[in-house]
Amino acid sequence: MPDCHPFLVVVGGFLGAGKTTLILKAAELLQRNGKRVAAILNDQGAELVDTTLVRNHGISAEQVAGGCFCCRFSDLVGAAERLKQYRPDVIFAEAVGSCTDISATTLQPLKRDYAGAFRLAPYTVLVDPSQLLEVRSGASDPEIAFLFQKQLEEADLVCITKTDLYQEDVSLGQSPVRYLSAVSGAGVTAWLDELGSGVLPVGGTILAIDYEQYARAEAALAWLNCRFRLDFVTPLSPPVVTGQLLDGLDAQLIAQNVRIVHLKMMDETSSGYIKAAVTANNQEPSVEGDLTASPARRHNLLLNIRAMASPEILQNIVLQQIKQPAGSLQIESFQCFSPAPPKPECRLSTVV
C-alpha cells in the first residue's frame, strides 16, 4: 500500500468560536464525497466533551491533553501518526481555545521536520462575531482581549462563524476574512476548497508575543473537567437532567460573579445522549443529540467549564450543584486548575 500523506488542517480560535462544530460539518461533507476523516482534539486537561462527541459521530479521534499543541508538540505528531493507520485523507487538529503562537511553535516545526509525512493546510482561526464585537467595544476582559487579538494576528485565514445567527460584515484589516455557518453548512465547502487550492500561505506569520503576558492571560481562566455518574430512583430523560444541571450551575455562577467563557455538558444514557453548550451566562444553550431520548435511571455525564474565576471558587460551585437530592452521585474524575505558563517544545523565529 502507498504511504499515507494526509492533509493536516489545524483550526484555532477562541473558546466557543465553533471549532468542533465546524470540524463535524466539514467531516460530514468530506465523507459524502468518499473522503476519510480523522480528528485530534486538544485541551489543557483530560476528559473532553468534544472528543466524546466526535467519536459519537463515527470519526476516528485522538486527544492531546495536558497543554496546548505548542507545549505538547511531540504528542500532536504522535497522535497524527497513530491516526494514519485509518488512512485518512484529512486530519483536523483543533487547538486549545486559549492558545496562540501556533505558527511559530506548531506550523513551522511541522513544515521543517514533517513535510514528508503530512500536507499542511493554511492556519484557520475562527471568530464568533459576538466575541469580536465585545472585544472591539472594550467590554471584554483585557486578558481575553489579548489572547483573542493574538490569535487573529497569526491567522492565514480568518473565518467569521455563526452566520446563521449574525449577519454583520466584519473588516479586520489583516488576514483574508470568510463567512460560514457550521450549523447550516453555508460557506463550509468553499472553505475546504480554499484550503486545498494552494493559494493561501501556510503559517505565513510569526507573532511578536510577550510570553509573560501570555501566561498571565491563560492563568486568568479556571478550567474544570469532570466525569460523573448520577443514578436516580425515578427515571429522568437526558434533556431534563442536563437542563436542571445547567440552570443550577448558571444561577450559582451568576450569584458569585463568575463569568462563563465556555461550558459544555454531555449526558449519555442507554436511551441516547444530549450535548449542550453555552458561551456566556444566562444564555440559551445550543443542543444536539436525541431530544426525545426516553427516561433512564443511570446518567453518565461529562462537564467542561472555562470561566473567569479562581479554581477554588469554580470547584466549590460545581461540587455543590452536581449533588442531587433525588439520586446518588459517583465522581469518576475531577480536574480544576489554572493553566501553567506555556513552554513550547520548539519555537522557530522565522517562517519556513
Image (cartoon, rainbow, N blue to C red):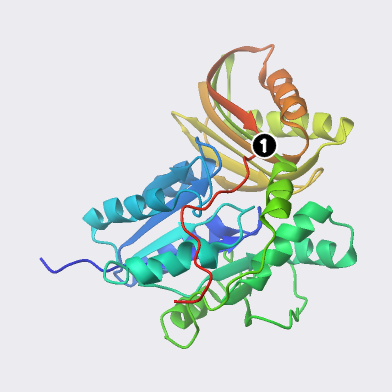
Q: Secondary structure at mark 1?
A: loop
- Quadrant in which the C terminus appears: bottom left
Give left or right: position of 151 versus 348.
right
Residue 16, by quadrant, is bottom right
Q: Is residue 200 above or below residue 251?
A: below
Image height of 341 relative to 269, above or below: below
| Residue drawn at 50 percent across, 36 percent down | 46
Counting from the top left corner in percent of width and height, residue 299 is at 53, 24
Instruction: Tell me the residue at 59%/48% (across/down).
Output: 342
Please give left or right for residue 64 compared with residue 32 in the image. right
Q: How many marks?
A: 1
Please indicate, yes or no, whether residue 162 appears anywhere in the rendered image: no
Point 57% across, 65% down: residue: 182
Point out the residue furthest to the left here.
1
Residue 296 drawn at (x, y percent): 52, 23
Q: Which residue is denoted by mark 1 in the rendering?
A: 338
Q: Is residue 14 left or right of residue 188?
A: right
Q: Nearer the viewer, residue 166 or 173?
A: 173
Q: Name the kind of residue labelled 1 in the image.
A: Ser
Which image quarter holds the N terminus?
A: bottom left
**Residue 311 position in % (x across, y down):** 71, 30
Residue 162: x %, y % from top left: 67, 66
Q: Residues within 10 Å of mark 1 (few under 14, many from 20)?
A: some
Q: Is residue 3 above or below residue 223?
A: below
Residue located farthest toward the front when viewing the structure as drawn: 349
Q: Residue at x 61, y 55 (%)?
A: 99
